[in-house]
Amino acid sequence: SSFKKVYNQKENYIHEDGKYKYIDYDFDRKLHYSDIEKILYSINNSSIAKLEIIGKSVDDRNIYGIEIGKGDKVIYLDANIHAAEVASTLFLTRFLNDLVNKYENGDKNIISALNTYKIVAIPSVNPDGYEVFNFGIDSIRNHDLWIYKNKDSVDYDNFKYNANGVDINRN
């Protein structure tokens, strides 16, 4: 029954809020999750992209799904299931950013590819873990969460969990 509810859910895309502008971010520096959100909203200003909030983290951060392309062949990508997998979020976000920039710039190969394929992506499955791994435990706003209550015993170098202490890759 809950599966059926999710399966039958209608899309709830975020409408673009302006004209597309070339997106140029410094992906060589640490980006806060809020920076990733700004990039996704900028990408969403392209006619080739559709952005949707597909969930919330336990620390109340948005989890986004994004579609880029018009094709019938779907390629699914996700990143940052484990907290320490932050490079994958940056790589995937940059990939999506570059695709849209090239599409908007008239790159014939990218236009052809995005007319054949649709990229469906979740750039960060674990935004709380992303933020903690990059910026420390003080980035957690809700101090009642497992991670904050156990902050002195967490191995942050090998941190795999979400803010509830659940390894969402294995659970």
Image (cartoon, grey):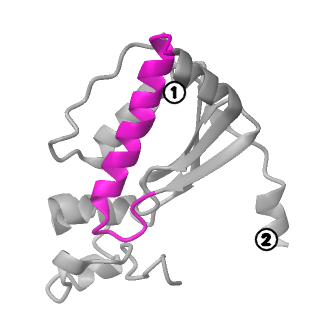
* Residue 154, image quadrant: bottom left
Callout 1: helix, strand or loop? loop
Q: Along the line of sight, which residue is nearer the eye, 157 or 113? A: 113
41 relative position to 70: left or right: left
Residue 103, labelled with which disc?
none
Above or below, 2 against 34 in this view is below
Q: Residue at x 47, y 25 (%)?
A: 100
Range of residues picked out in magenta: 79-107
| N-terminal label among 2 and 1 | 2
Q: In this figure, which residue is indicated by the disc labeled 1? A: 44
Above or below, 151 against 61 in this view is below
What type is the residue that disc 2 sits on? Ser
Q: Residue at x 19, y 59 (%)?
A: 134
Classify 10 Å Cα crowding around label 2: few (below 14), some (14-19), many (20 and above). few
Classify 10 Å Cα crowding around label 1: few (below 14), some (14-19), many (20 and above). many
Mark 2–mark 1 CB contact (< 8 Å): no
Q: Along the line of sight, which residue is nearer the eye, 48 or 109? A: 109
Across and down, in percent, residue 25 comes to 25, 29
Across and down, in percent, residue 96 comes to 45, 36
6 relative position to 94: left or right: right
